[in-house]
Image: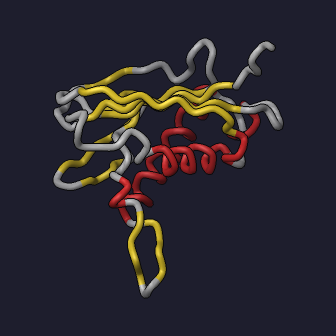
Amino acid sequence: MPAVTGGTRTRRATAVAFMPNGSAVRAPALQPDGLLHLVLPLPPSINHHYATVQGRRVLSSAGRRFKTLVGQEVLCTLAKRKAGRPSSMIPANAPLALDLHFYFASELRRDIDGGLKITQDAVCEALGINDNRIVEVTLRKEKDAVSPRMELSLRLCHPQAP
């Protein structure tokens, strides 16, 4: 199983996401109105996304581990649905919406937007699509000290009626 290590805890995500306290959160892989739904560990904080190596800013090991985990989860979910190539599940050039619901151990410890970019990049990279196709983003933040996590949904973005 893929694992992400952050601090002193190792968090695992599979079809059932295992949280730091050992509890499991089940979520359907496909929402009725969406393309993809995943429950994942929280991304590393923005302060841990990048490192400076020989004067260059690079993605940190925590950032690389998170991107790898998200990519594996996307591909495993698609394989279970027998969706073929990742990009085949999304109509060509269709605008997409990304919904991220963060459940933090404390509402005051993390900013709501800190995990957006790395998560968006990881999902789009795994699907083989350009992240400029995401034209709508919804971020939510709640407290769940027992089971911190991120719930991710990717869906087709329907244009607003005039």
- Which residue is drawn at the image coordinates 18% and 30% (left, top)? 145
Residue 95 relative to residue 35: left or right: right
Of 132 and 88, which appears nearest the observer? Answer: 132
Query: Image height check: is 68 above or below 95?
Result: below
The color scheme shown is: secondary structure
Tell me where residue 20 appears, x and y as whole percent: 21, 38
Q: Residue furthest front?
A: 162
Residue 51 relative to residue 5: left or right: right
Q: In which quarter of the image is residue 104?
A: top left
Q: Which image quarter is the C terminus in?
A: top right
Tell me where residue 106 appears, x and y as whole percent: 20, 35
Residue 53 relative to residue 105: left or right: right
Of 104 and 38, which appears nearest the observer? Answer: 104
Tell me where residue 57 appears, x and y as whole percent: 47, 74
- Which residue is drawn at the image coordinates 75% and 32% (left, top)? 95
Residue 82 relative to residue 42: left or right: right
Tell me where residue 151 appears, x and y as whole percent: 42, 29
